[in-house]
Structure formats: C-alpha cells, structure tokens
Image (cartoon, helix red, strand yellow):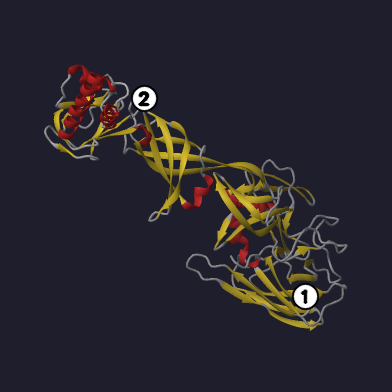
Amino acid sequence: MRAPVELQETSPGQYRGKFNLSMRGEWPLTIRFDAPGGKAVRLQFDLATDRAEMPIAAGGEPAGGAAGPGKMESGMPRYRAGELEVAIDIDPGTARVGDNTLLLELRGTDGQLLAGAQVQAHAEMPAMGAMPAMRAPVDLAETSPGQFRGDFNLSMRGEWPLTVTISHPQYGEKRLQFDLATDREGLAIAAGAAPVDAAGAQMAEGGADVITIDNRRRQMIGVQTGEVEKRHLVKPIRTVGRVTFDERLLSKVVLKYDAFVGDLKADYVGTQVEKGQVLFTIYSPELLAAQQEYLDSLKRARGRGTETRDDLLRAARQRLALWDMMPQEIRALEERGWPQEYIPIYAPRSGTLIKLNIADGSAARAGQTLLVVADLSRVWVEAEVFEADLDLVSAGTPADITLPYLPGREYEAQVEYVYPYLEGKSRTGRIRLTLDNPKGELKPEMYAEVSLQSDLGQRLSVPEQAIIVAGDSRVVFVDLGGGRLRPTRIETGRSAGDYVEVLAGLKAGDRVVTSGNFLIAAETRLKTGVQQW
C-alpha cells in the first residue's frame, strides 16, 4: 500500500504536504529530490504509527553527526572482528545496477595497517522461485599494505548480501556479512563483526557468531522475545489403557476332591451372586465316605465317653473342614446322623460370575477352576508408558482418566503401582491405577485415555517455540540488545507443555527470540554463525 504525499513549496526551501495512512503499522518514508549540481538524492526514513521518532534509514545521516560506526582516516565505517579491525565501504555510496567498487582496509591490534592478509569477497542475490541465485564476485587487489580495492557488477536491482572472507596467519580466518542493496546507501553489518565508535571502542557485544537486524526489519518479521528463567514444570504424559478386574477382588471356586455337579443354580456368566449364596451342589464318593467315617468315629467316641479327646474323631472332623465343609454343615451332619449325598457349594464373595466351567451333571476334578466371581465395585486401569517417560512415573503420580464412551466424564486417580518390567515388543512399561466403580459404569476391557501429570519441580527453561532443531543441535537466538542476536547452541532436557528444560548454553535472565526464528535464519543466512546449520 502506498500513501503519496502532496508536497507544496510554502517558502523558498520549505515544503509541506499531507498524506493518509490507512492502517496502523510500519510505513517507510522515501523522499527524492535533486541536489545543487543536478545530483539525485534519495532519502529513506523509518516511519510508523504510534511512534514519535522518524530515524534516518538510508541515504544520509543526522546533521551534526550521530552515533554509529566510527570512521578511519579514510572516512570509511569500521568494525571489529575479534582482534582484527576492518574498514569497509562502497563507491558510489549507494549501490547501483552496473559497476561498483569495494574499498577495504585492515588493521591489527596495534592500529597499524595489516599486510599479508588474503581477502575474498562476493555479493550474491538469493534464489527466488525458479530464478537461481546470482553471484557478483569482487575482483579485489591489494593496492598497498592492508588496503584493498575491487570492482563488482550488480546485474539487477534488489538485495545483494555481501560476504567478505579474510585470512591472516596471525588472526586466522574471519567471515563477515553485510546487507547490501541497490538504491540503499552504504553497507550494514549483518554478521561476523561489531561496529566500532569514533574512539575505537566496540559499540556492542559482537563476534563472528553475532548477527544484526534493525528495528524496522525486526518488526516486519514479527520478532518477539521471551526470558530464560526457572519455572515450575509439570510434564503431561498421555497414554492409553484398559479397564480390568481388580485381582484382589477375584474369587475362584475350586474343589479339593473329585466330584459330580448336581443342581447348578448360578448357571450363566454375568449373574449376580451374594456371599453365602448356594452356587451349585456336588456329589463326591470321597466326601460321602469322609462323612460316614466321621459319623462312625463320633459314635464310638460317644460310646466310650471320649468325644472331646478322641484323636480319630478330631482327625475326621479336620478332614471335613479341610474339604470346605462349613461348621454348621458338620453340626447338621451330627444331628442328622447320616451322610448327605449332595453338598451345597457357597459363593465366597458378593459379585458377578465371570467364568463358568461346569454344567448340570458334569464332572469336576480336584484343583479345577469351576467358577470365578469378581467384585466390580472397584476396578483397575492398566496403561502403557513409553520407556523414555517411565522414570517420570512413580506411585502417587496424579492422573486424569477419560473413556470414549462416557464423554464429559473425568475420573481422578493416582498411580498405584509401576510394574518392574517392560513389554518386550512395544518397549513400554505398565502402570496400574485404581478406580471406584459403585454404579458399574466401568466395565473390564473398556479402553481408557490416561493423562499423567509428572511434577518436574523448578527447572531452567525456555519457550518451546524459541528452539530451532538443526540436525543433532538445538539452536536459539539470544537477544543482546540493540538489534543484535547471537545464535547459540544449547543442550535441552525434558519438555513440559510449552516449555523445554535447558541443561547448558543459557543462564537465567537471558532473552531469546520466540517468534520469527526461521525468518531470521533465512534473512541472515545462519550458516555464517552456526556451522552445523
């Protein structure tokens, strides 16, 4: 969108005009005029709604000078890359389509011109769509010790980032990047060095890994920052499980002798039974003989008057008790005086019949499970947790459980037990939670969604969106202030919601970029600062 200014000369050398901004935001202002002598001048200013200042962006500088890169005797802006001082400029001052000249001076720690350096430079327009990248090499030559000059040709208008590589036996290799564009005055350092003021002091923290993005471009990219600090992290662990029986509330009905089923009263799976209810009757020749043996022993003991101290009688009674005859049944046997052919078997607990392995008249072998009764007033939920998260889960870890067939219902629970082994094929560990089920809504074999909340405590962390994954590396942009950013490799730990634990590379109080990371990387070509990118 363009907002033209209707300028009128109100008096010699003074102009005034109105313009309309249709929305809030950045509106870079461009002014063109012919200076005395016919030379065309183009000035650019940073203009934005809700901002009082309108700083010069290109084409000139504030009257009386302004804070910025210092000037050498040659008048060129200068920068410091490690211990090396670089002065660099272009001629003409605003790059144009066609031939341009790059001027460069090198000085060492003593401030003297530095001989013996190898310098290479090129400008390159990035690829755009189907158009490949275009390179404009600079034909640099050392005109005198420490001073270089070279021509290069820009074939079209646009952005031509300039890369300068300096090699010296004493100072090593330095790689600097500058923002260069046609119709924009001068060069702006992007990475690899920091500006130096007129007194020779470095204006801001810098180095080969520091990049610079001006406020206008930061706002266009949408850069936002967040603070590195210790936060209370709670890691959610989501998994699936299934409802199953509480094994502590299961009862099996098993005989200790061979028998035959008489009248089966609990005759289908799912029937509800009460503790003490007759499930079925059985006939057993062994049990019948044991009853008769007890009655004979009882008769002899009474005849001798030794009922309370007769060992054979006591052994016969113990045998009946071990075969699960109840005390009232033994008393009834004594009163009746003859053995009962079909003995009732009672329910050991109240619950639901979940297994039935017999029918009327079927044979029942000793040790065979005939029936299984389950109390479903309390159930287990067993879930699988990935091996990587298993150390975060322990007895007492809180959890929320939902079931797909009960939308809107959520059950609160705690991990009751972590099984001490892994499932070999899935490489997961099994955990157990217990839920009350008074209404019987939770049925075994139902699927459940389990959300665990693992408390990690206070951990140094950054917002997750601040981290760029670069192969095996994790990279963040540390905001140094003044538009300067340093790509920094960090070591990360656990992630918890929107935050990631930082193990190394950052300290509390640092500010990191949380929005616009990838655009910054593309804008500044991060490979200059981070080799692994």
Amino acid residing under circle 2: Pro
Amino acid residing under circle 1: Tyr
- Disc 1 is placed on an element classified as loop
Q: Between residues 257 and 70, which one lies in front from this camera angle?
A: 257
Name the residue located 21 percent from the left edge and 32 percent from the top edge. 269
Please, which residue is most extreme toward the front here?
304
Residue 438 tag number: 2
Is 248 left or right of 336, judged from the image as shown? right
**Residue 52 location, quadrant:** top right
Q: Position of residue 364 (x, y in %)?
A: 18, 37
Name the residue located 39 percent from the left edge and 41 percent from the top edge. 382
Residue 171 tag number: 1
Q: Between residues 109 and 289, which one lies in front from this camera angle?
A: 289
In the picture, the quarter occupied by the C terminus is bottom right
Name the residue located 67 percent from the left edge and 71 percent from the top edge. 163
Is 247 left or right of 268, judged from the image as shown? right
Is residue 3 in view from this perspective?
A: no
Pointer 1 with pointer 2, Cβ within 8 A: no
Is 286 left or right of 73, judged from the image as shown? left
In the rendered view, would you say 469 is above or below 90? above
Q: Between residues 138 and 400, which one lies in front from this camera angle?
A: 400
Nearer the N terminus, badge 1 or badge 2? Answer: 1
In the rendered view, would you say 496 is above or below 79? above
Q: Position of residue 118 (x, y in %)?
A: 73, 81
